[in-house]
Image (spheres, rainbow, N blue to C red):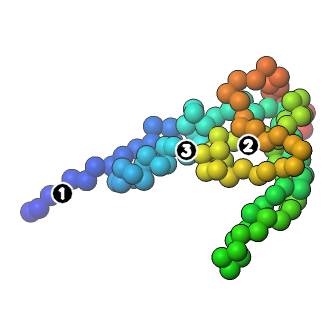
């Protein structure tokens, strides 16, 4: 009988597992349960999605072109800025909005307001 043992790697933050180290490292980097990726804005009452015309870069038949497209983005009503998650920052998946800021969600915020789920 031949017996082979394969190493399984587990994400320390969620149930994800893999036998490939590179795949696991990539997962941990982007894992939404990784404390590095968790920001107070994600559960803050001031984070209200807002529609805005953002610049979107498209690649059509090899030609890059920028168009304006209406998208709904997280918006901090207290700081009056658009905000994006650290995962979007890592993926460079950030919309550019003319005349507006689109900042990465801060690790700490003094204006944090807990979402009130008692009034449904
Ligand atoms: Zn994970």
| Front disc: 1 or 3 | 3
Report if residue 116 is visible in the image.
Answer: no
Residue 80: image tag? none
Q: Closer to the N terminus: mark 2 or mark 3?
A: 3
Q: Closer to the N terminus: mark 1 or mark 3?
A: 1
Residue pictured at 45% horizontal, 42% vertical:
11
Query: How far apart are the alpha carbons under marks 1 and 2?
Result: 45 Å
| Front disc: 1 or 2 | 2
* Residue 96 location (% of width, % of height): 79, 51
Q: Is residue 1 above or below residue 120?
A: below
Residue ID for mark 3: 31
Pointers 2 and 3 in contact (C-beta within 8 Å): no
Where residue 66 sits, quadrant-wise, is: bottom right
Quadrant where the C terminus sits is top right
Residue 8 placement, left or right of 30: left
Residue pictured at 36% horizontal, 46% vertical:
9
Q: Residue farthest to the left?
A: 1
Residue ID for mark 2: 84
Residue ID for mark 1: 4
């Amino acid at each position: 009988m031949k017996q082979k043992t394969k190493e399984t790697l587990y994400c320390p933050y969620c149930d994800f597992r893999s036998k490939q180290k590179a795949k696991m490292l990539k997962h941990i980097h982007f894992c939404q349960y990784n404390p590095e990726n968790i920001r107070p804005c994600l559960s803050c009452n001031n984070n209200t999605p807002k529609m805005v015309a953002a610049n979107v870069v498209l690649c059509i038949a090899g030609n890059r072109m920028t168009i304006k497209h209406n998208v709904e983005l997280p918006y901090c009503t207290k700081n009056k800025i658009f905000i994006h998650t650290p995962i979007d920052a890592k993926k460079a998946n950030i919309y550019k909005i003319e005349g507006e800021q689109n900042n990465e969600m801060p690790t700490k915020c003094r204006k944090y307001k807990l979402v009130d789920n008692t009034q449904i």
